[in-house]
Amino acid sequence: MISRAARIALGLGAMLIGMGQAVAAPDADPGKKACVQEARRLCPAEMKSLSRKKVEACMIAKIDQTSPVCHAAMLRIRAERQAAAKR
């Protein structure tokens, strides 16, 4: 059985891979680890919900409070969401 923390990390990792992109190696995106730790701090309720969309929305809303590495990852995710919405 996978622990709750592992499920959250996997969900956030999937979020950071981005929509429509090939699955990358876990260490391929340095923003992944930074964002998981920051999401636990900035969005604890959303992390507990295990909802990737809720965590993404919370992190994007609090993007100014994130580290430069996570900030860059969240900007990529936000741009991908906006591009997908225009299709």
Image (cartoon, grey):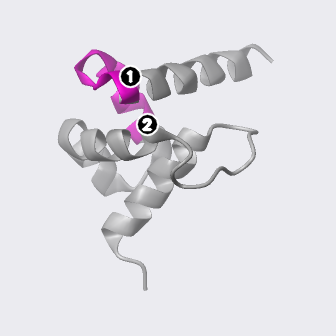
Which residue occupies the foreground of this view, 47 or 9?
9
Q: Which residue is tagged 1?
A: 71
Callout 1 amino acid: His
Vertical order, 63 against 19 (above or below): above
Q: Which residue is tagged 2?
A: 31
Residue 21, given in percent of the width and then of the height, sits at 74, 40
Residue 43 occupies quadrant: top left
Vertical order, 72 against 56 (above or below): above
Main SS category, magenta section: helix
**For mark 1, does the 10 Å Cα neighbourhood hold few (<14), some (14 to 19), or many (20 or more) residues?**
many
Quick one: label 1 or label 2, which is nearer the N terminus? 2
**Number of marks in picture:** 2
Left or right: where 22 falls relative to 49 = right
Residue 64 occupies quadrant: top left
Q: Which mark is residue 6?
A: none
Residue 7: in magenta span: no
Residue 33, given in percent of the width and then of the height, sits at 38, 46
Residue 39, given in percent of the width and then of the height, sits at 29, 41
| Residue at 74 percent of width and 13 percent of height | 86
Secondary structure at badge 1 equals helix
Residue at the extreme left of the image, as rendered: 41
Vertical order, 5 against 43 (above or below): below
| Residue at 32 percent of width and 65 percent of height | 5
Residue 69 occupies quadrant: top left
Residue 58, given in percent of the width and then of the height, sits at 34, 31
Left or right: where 82 falls relative to 67 = right
Which residue occupies the foreground of this view, 86 or 20?
20
Residues rendered magenta in the picture: 55-69
**Label 1, label 2: how many angstroms apart (C-alpha)?**
8 Å
| Residue at 29 percent of width and 22 percent of height | 62
Secondary structure at badge 2 equals helix
